Amino acid sequence: MRKKNWTLFIFLLVLGFAWGIYYWFGIVQ
C-alpha cells in the first residue's frame, strides 16, 4: 500500500470513531 492510502484510511477511521462517540453521548444525554 502507498502511504497516502494509509493516511486516508486512518483519517476516516479516526473520524468515524469520533463521530460514533459524539453520537453516543448525544443519545445518553
Image: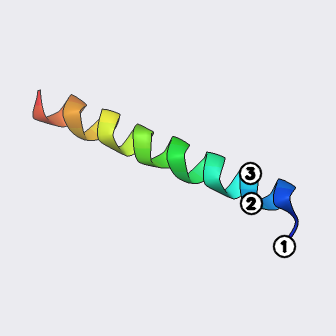
Amino acid on which the number 2 mark rests in the picture: Trp
Amino acid on which the number 1 mark rests in the picture: Met
Q: Position of residue 13 (x, y in %)?
A: 55, 53
Question: 10 Å neighbourhood of mark 1: few (<14), some, or many (≥20)?
Answer: few
Which numbered disc flags the more N-terminal residue, 2 or 1?
Answer: 1
- Which residue does the image show at 63% across and 54% down from the upper left? 10
Q: Which residue is mark 2?
A: 6
The answer to whether the residue labelled 3 contacts the one labelled 2, judged by CB atoms less than 8 Å apart, is yes
The answer to whether the residue labelled 2 contacts the one labelled 1, judged by CB atoms less than 8 Å apart, is yes
- The extreme bottom residue here reads 1
Which numbered disc flags the more N-terminal residue, 3 or 1?
Answer: 1
- Quadrant in which residue 4 is drawn: bottom right
Question: In the image, is residue 25 above or below residue 17?
Answer: above
Image check: 5 left or right of 19?
A: right
- Element marked by disc 1: loop
Amino acid on which the number 3 mark rests in the picture: Leu
Q: Position of residue 3 (x, y in %)?
A: 83, 59
